[in-house]
């Protein structure tokens, strides 16, 4: 199958591209930084330079493609890269180019918790609006809503690893009882591959790991994998919220945005996990993923135990 892919040089896209290549699919990717795609180009992947606002680049990306996988998303707004522009506007452009090119299959990455309700964050509202664009496109489509994606290159996991490795204490916002359901990035990549290869799978699906964990339980498993035990320091939610709102004026110095705080506290779990039942993927437990991501650091992490 000839697959056009957006976001192939990003966090999830790198894993999806590798999975599709291992399954003998031909790839063409869109990237704003072609120099970052050297490894993929060496494996025969066609590279189109451009972004989601470049109609010519999008037409070149999807020309002759059997399927499109749209993965581009942001977690923090920066300059012209707003949630509205990237999630909604970008998806409209990719869908329009795909329809014009007669693409027969469209796979889209949304996010667990995406919804249009007023109390939702802008991130989740624009993800939900992008889903509506895909649903109304007339294209054969599948929309995946992954939970927190666990891998060494995930920003949240990397931050936690750095804290546990390098600091004698770890701050915990509030009571740490908010729940998450982390899913292994390779399981997400496999679900996208299956979604392309089985066109009978249609609709919108939550995909998550098998374990619902509190923030404290996630820290427990990462500590165990690293072989350390750190002191946890609770930080009142009000203090973090004030800092997050004040930090919008200095985003480069702000460790968490107001939207990210809201999403953390509301949790990120699903009772409708389709990973195994629909996509045939046996989800990996977070403890197994934690051992894998911590392995390179475990021997050195004991310094400063407390």
Image (spheres, helix red, strand yellow):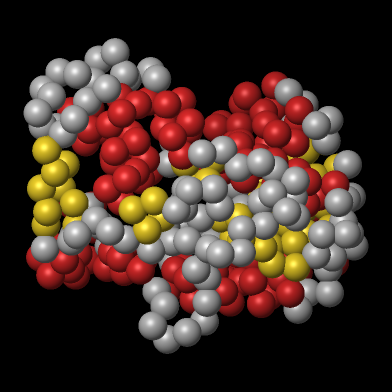
Residue 6 placement (x, y as % from top left): 65, 50
Q: How many marks?
A: 0
Looking at the image, residue 32 lies above or below residue 241: above
Residue 162 placement (x, y as % from top left): 26, 33
Residue 180 placement (x, y as % from top left): 41, 55
Residue situated in front as seen by the camera: 119 or 72: 119
Looking at the image, residue 214 lies above or below residue 77: above
Looking at the image, residue 109 lies above or below residue 120: above
The structure residue drawn at horizontal position 80% and vertical position 65%, both measured from the top left corner, is: 202
Residue situated in front as seen by the camera: 47 or 225: 225
The structure residue drawn at horizontal position 27% and vertical position 68%, both measured from the top left corner, is: 258
- Left or right, 31 with respect to 135, comes to left
Looking at the image, residue 124 lies above or below residue 155: below
- The image quarter containing residue 119 is bottom left
- Left or right, 135 with respect to 75, comes to right
- The image quarter containing residue 56 is bottom right
User: Residue furthest toward the top?
Assistant: 299
Q: Is residue 260 visible?
A: no
Residue 230 placement (x, y as % from top left): 16, 34
Quadrant where the image shows the N terminus: top right
Quadrant where the image shows the C terminus: top left
User: Residue furthest toward the bottom?
Assistant: 118
- Left or right, 42 with respect to 229, comes to right
- The image quarter containing residue 301 is top left
Residue situated in front as seen by the camera: 218 or 151: 218
The structure residue drawn at horizontal position 12% and vertical position 54%, both measured from the top left corner, is: 234
The structure residue drawn at horizontal position 43% and vertical position 41%, both measured from the top left corner, is: 154
Residue situated in front as seen by the camera: 47 or 70: 70
Q: Is residue 154 visible?
A: yes
């Amino acid at each position: 199958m000839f697959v056009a892919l957006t976001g192939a040089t990003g966090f999830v896209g790198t894993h999806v591209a590798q999975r599709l290549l291992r399954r003998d699919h031909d790839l063409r990717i869109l990237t704003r930084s072609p120099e970052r795609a050297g490894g993929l180009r060496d494996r025969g992947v066609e590279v189109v330079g451009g972004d989601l606002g470049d109609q010519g680049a999008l037409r070149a990306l999807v020309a002759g493609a059997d399927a499109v996988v749209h993965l581009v998303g942001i977690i923090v707004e920066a300059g012209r890269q707003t949630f509205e522009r990237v999630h909604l506007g970008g998806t409209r452009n990719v869908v329009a180019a795909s329809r014009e090119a007669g693409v027969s299959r469209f796979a889209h990455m949304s996010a667990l918790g995406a919804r249009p309700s007023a109390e939702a964050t802008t991130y989740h509202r624009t993800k939900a609006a992008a889903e509506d664009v895909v649903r109304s496109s007339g294209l054969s489509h599948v929309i995946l809503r992954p939970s927190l994606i666990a891998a060494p290159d995930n920003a949240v996991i990397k931050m936690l690893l750095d804290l546990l490795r390098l600091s004698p204490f770890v701050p915990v916002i509030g009571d740490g009882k908010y729940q998450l359901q982390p899913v292994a990035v390779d399981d997400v990549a496999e679900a996208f591959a299956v979604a392309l290869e089985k066109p009978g799978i249609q609709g919108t699906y939550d995909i998550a790991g098998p374990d619902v964990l509190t923030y404290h339980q996630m820290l427990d498993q990462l500590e165990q994998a690293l072989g350390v035990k750190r002191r946890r320091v609770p930080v009142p939610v009000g203090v973090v919220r004030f800092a997050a709102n004040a930090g919008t004026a200095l985003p480069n110095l702000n460790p968490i945005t107001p939207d990210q705080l809201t999403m953390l506290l509301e949790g990120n779990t699903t009772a409708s996990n389709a990973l195994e039942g629909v996509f045939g993927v046996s989800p990996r437990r977070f403890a197994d993923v934690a051992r894998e991501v911590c392995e390179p650091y475990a021997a050195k992490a004991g310094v400063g135990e407390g």
